Image (cartoon, rainbow, N blue to C red):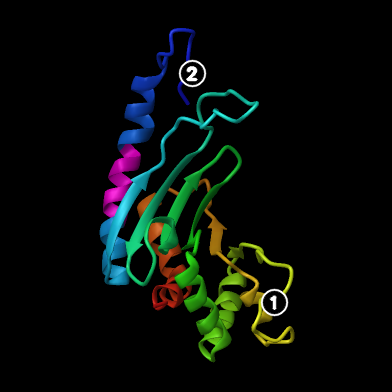
Amino acid sequence: MPTTPANGSWTNKDRYDSELKAPALALLDVVAADLERMTGHRVSPKLFRPQRDIRFSKDKTPYKTHLHMLWDIDGGSGSGLDRSAFYFGIELDRIVLGGGCMGMDKAKLAAFRKRVASPKGKDLMRAMAAASTEGTRFSDPDLKRVPAPFPTDHPQGELLKHKTLTFWREVDADTTDLHKTLQGGFAKLMPLQEWLLALR
């Protein structure tokens, strides 16, 4: 990642633009087209900024050591981070792809809990179990207790503790066709994503 000398300029900006940013933008566009076909919804790609927010951090390192991109799905309920999305990240020690909903506003959370508590909640549990056998991991519950008015022994109690739901799996660093790898990886996550997209 670029370094910053005293005058604030990027010593490696040209290298970042050519070796990271340009290929990432190209990948974002081609995968966005794939996801629009898979989901039936408009997809908005996003490349996250390389700069770190250091305003309230003791660590003043100016740039991130990872490259993250996201495909926001314009379907279901919510807006911005309340919407379902797919993401991909290249980090120092791993490469991951994933999806889910990183935030839920009050209305979407209510819809999520209502659907989880219904028979449809069992569909999500089965989809999660199937994905887990293939190496998919899930975000931990946000709450320690099952929220009211649901009974503490509700069959989908663990899911009801979630206020967000994200899932991810690691990508083989030796993959020779990243586009194909993302296509296949996101296709395997579609049952989970479709469940979230059905929220109203």
Circle nearer the N terminus (1, 2):
2
Q: Position of residue 47 (x, y in %)?
A: 37, 42
> Residue 60: x and y, percent?
59, 23
Total numbered badges shown on the rendered structure = 2
Residue found at x 34% / y 21% = 14
187 or 8, which lies in front? 8
For residue 113, side relative to residue 41 (left or right): right
The residue at which mark 2 appears reads as 3
Q: Name the residue: 27% across, 53% down.
A: 30
Report the Cα–Cα distance between label 1 and label 2. Answer: 47 Å
Rendering coords of residue 23 (x, y %): 32, 38
Task: Categorize mark 1 by other alpha carbons within 10 Å: few (<14), some (14-19), many (20+).
Answer: some
Q: Which residue is mark 1?
A: 146
Residue 151 versus residue 177 in the image, above or below: below
- Label 1 is placed on what type of residue? Val
Magenta part of the chain = 23-31
Residue 86 at x, y percent in the picture: 42, 59
Q: Residue at x 61, y 71 (%)?
A: 132
